[in-house]
Image: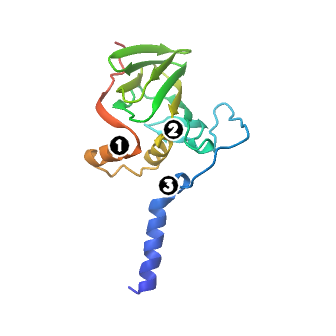
């Protein structure tokens, strides 16, 4: 293969790998003007689809505020939720818009329904699980944002689907969380 052809091929391959994270690689200043995100809409018109039909719609992006916060609405169809984990540098807050969830923070497990909120401080293991039939909605908030928005975007794009569990755990840590146990059962306790 000629050197120029090889270099062009390398550039094309690198662009395919870098494209999903290019959006987050740029330093964006805090916006200085308010904005509205309509009901059911995403801040940048590209909701994140995860976990067999669950959708995350960004309401305040980490790009809006130089990483100070990340807030999104999570519409969940499937019962269950993420494994027990903690964030070394982010606090997390859940506000239930509809449906019902079990939310475990440390040793406490709460049943949360529409209108309830639960706060999870950084470094404390936590997990949550949707428990009701049909759709449920959460408003979720990370402060500071860390790299959680980037993580969800990359997972949605399939970037990490080829990784072993050991490699995936290393990536999770790189993006700001550490898995410490299994997911909660979605059955009410």
The answer to the question of whether label 1 and label 2 lie on touching residues, with beta carbons closer than 8 A, is: no
In the rendered image, residue 5, in percent from the top left (x then y), is placed at 45, 82
Q: Is residue 38 above or below residue 103?
A: below
Kindly identify the residue that appears in the image at 48 percent across and 70 percent down.
12
Kindly identify the residue that appears in the image at 31 percent across and 46 percent down.
170
Counting residues from the start of the chain, the first of labels 1 and 2 encountered is: 2
User: Secondary structure under badge 2?
Assistant: loop
In the rendered image, residue 6, in percent from the top left (x then y), is placed at 41, 80
Counting residues from the start of the chain, the first of labels 2 and 3 encountered is: 3
The answer to the question of whether label 1 and label 3 lie on touching residues, with beta carbons closer than 8 A, is: no
Residue identified by numbered label 2: 145
Kindly identify the residue that appears in the image at 64 percent across and 36 percent down.
41
Q: Which is more toward the observer, 83 or 29?
A: 29
Q: CA distance from mark 1 to mark 3?
A: 19 Å
Dot label at residue 173? 1
Dot label at residue 20? 3
User: Secondary structure under badge 3?
Assistant: helix
């Amino acid at each position: 293969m000629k050197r120029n052809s090889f270099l062009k091929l390398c550039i094309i391959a690198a662009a395919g790998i870098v494209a999903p994270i290019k959006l987050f690689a740029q330093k964006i200043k805090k916006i200085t003007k308010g904005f509205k995100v309509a009901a059911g809409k995403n801040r940048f018109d590209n909701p994140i689809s995860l976990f067999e039909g669950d959708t995350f719609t960004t309401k305040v992006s980490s790009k809006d505020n130089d990483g100070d916060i990340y807030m999104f609405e999570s519409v969940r169809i499937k019962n269950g939720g993420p494994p027990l984990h903690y964030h070394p540098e982010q606090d997390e807050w859940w506000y239930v818009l509809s449906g019902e969830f079990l939310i475990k923070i440390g040793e406490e497990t709460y049943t949360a329904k529409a209108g309830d909120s639960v706060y999870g401080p950084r470094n404390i293991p936590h997990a949550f699980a949707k428990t009701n039939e049909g759709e449920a909605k959460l408003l979720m908030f990370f402060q500071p944002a860390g790299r959680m928005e980037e993580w969800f975007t990359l997972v949605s794009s399939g970037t990490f689907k080829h990784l072993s569990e050991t490699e995936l755990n290393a990536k999770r840590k790189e993006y700001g969380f550490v898995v410490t146990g299994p997911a909660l059962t979605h059955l009410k306790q």
